[in-house]
Image (tube, rainbow, N blue to C red):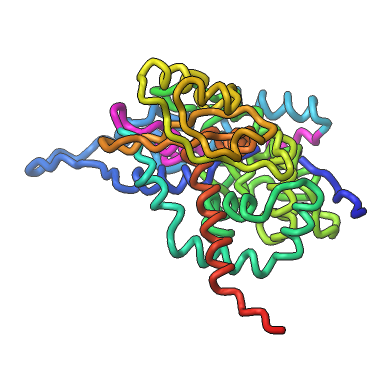
Amino acid sequence: MLRSPIRRRLVIGGAALATMAATSAAALQKSVEVEPKPPAPKKKKASHKAKPIGDDDVPELVTYGRRGDVMAFADAIAERRGLEIGWVRAALEQSRFVPNVARFIMPPPAGTAKNWAAYRSRFVETIRIRAGVAFWNANEKWLALAEELYGVPPEIVVGIVGVESIYGRQMGNFRVIDALATLAFDFPVGRKDRSEFFKEELESWFVLCKSEGVDPVAWKGSYAGAIGMAQFMPSSFNKYAVDLDGDGHVNLHESAADVIGSVAHYMAEFGWKRGLPVRFDVKPPTDSSERAALLAPDIVPTFSAAEMQARGAWLPPEAASVDSALALVELQNGTAAPSYVAGTSNFYAVTRYNWSSYYAMAVVELGEAVRTRMKATAPAVTN
C-alpha cells in the first residue's frame, strides 16, 4: 500500500473562463473623440485613489500603499495569522489596481445566448488533444499513482489541466497580489459584490507565501488570482494541494506530479467516487412539464434511473445499476436544440472545480478525446 503524500492546502478558479474573458475583453477599445485644435488640457494632481471603472481618467496603475483601509487590512491579517506586519504591509504597498482585472471579472452582456457546441470547440480541439497526449505520456506514472490514491482516472485529471491551462501554456500574466487586491478593494459595480471572497483569498495568499517561502509580489496567475497549471485559488492551494513527488514543496507551476496529485485530491475531497461513470446518454421526456420537473434541480443529482424513466426519459440499461442519483443536465446550443446528458454524482464533483455544467462537459470530453487519441497512436503489441 502506498503512503499518502504530504497534504497541503487550495480553490479553483477557472483558467478556461479566464482565457475566454480575456479574449473578449481584448476586443474592447476606447473611442477617442477628435476635435479641431483642442485647448491644452489642464494638468491634474496625481491621485492615489482608484477611480470607478469606465472613467476616462482611470490611470494604468494605482498603488494601494496610501489606502488606509488596505493598511488596516494588512495589520488585521498579520495579527490573525501570526505574520510579520511589516512584511504584509510592504507587499500590499506594492500592490496595484489593474483596470483589466476589473473588466474581465464582469459577466457577459445580458442576453448572450449559451452555446455548448461553440464552447466545446474552444477546448476539445487539436492543440489541446495533442498536448494532452504528450502530458499523459510524460506523466503516466504520476497519473497512475494519483488514481491509486484518490480514485480519479487519468482522463479526468488530464481534462481539467488541459481546460485550465493547456498543460501549463496559459497560466496567466497578472501578478497574483494585484489581481486579488483589485477585486478585494475595488470590486466593480455591475455584478454581485464578491469583494469579501477576494479579501479571504488575499489573506490565504499571504498564508501560502509564508508557508512556501514565496515573495508575495513575485508570482503571476489569472485575472482572478488563480495559480499554476491547475489554476488553484490560494485557499484551495492551502487546503488541497499535495506534494506528490515528495520534494518537500508544492509546485503547481513546474511539477506535473504535484499538479496531478493536487487535482485528484481536490476531486476526491469534493465527492469523486472510484469507478463511477460521469454521465450517460439520455433522451429527455417529450412532455414539457415532465421535462421541467427533471430539470428543476439543475445539475444536482436527485433522481434514480427508474424515476427519470417513469417521467418519460430514455436511459441506457447500464444507468439502472449505478450507485448514484442522476441529474438531467441541459446544455443550450444557441438557437439550435439543446443537448442533454444524465449526470452522476461524479459529474457534479467535476462542477465543484468550476461551477458550470459546460465546463464539466468540456473536461470530460477533452479527457476522453485524449484517451482515444492515445489508443489510436499506441504501438501495436506483438507476441
Estimate the x, y position of residue 270 in percent, counting from the top left: 70, 34
Residue 10 visible from this viewpoint: no
Viewer-nearest residue: 53 or 12: 12
Region rendered in magenta: 83-112
Was residue 6 drawn as part of the magenta stretch in this picture? no
Viewer-nearest residue: 365 or 353: 365
* Total numbered circles: 0
Compared to 105, does 379 lie above or below? below
Image quadrant in which you'd find residue 241: top right
The furthest residue to the left: 36
Residue visible at 47% across and 43% down in the picture:
17
Residue visible at 33% across and 38% down in the picture:
333
Compared to 329, does 19 lie above or below? below
Residue visible at 59% across and 30% down in the picture:
198
Was residue 110 drawn as part of the magenta stretch in this picture? yes
Viewer-nearest residue: 138 or 319: 319
- Horizontal side of 336 relative to 71 (left or right) equals left
- Horizontal side of 120 relative to 113 (left or right) equals right
Estimate the x, y position of residue 310 in percent, counting from the top left: 51, 21
Residue visible at 7% across and 43% down in the picture:
36
Viewer-nearest residue: 95 or 136: 136
Image quadrant in which you'd find residue 245: bottom right
Residue 119 visible from this viewpoint: yes
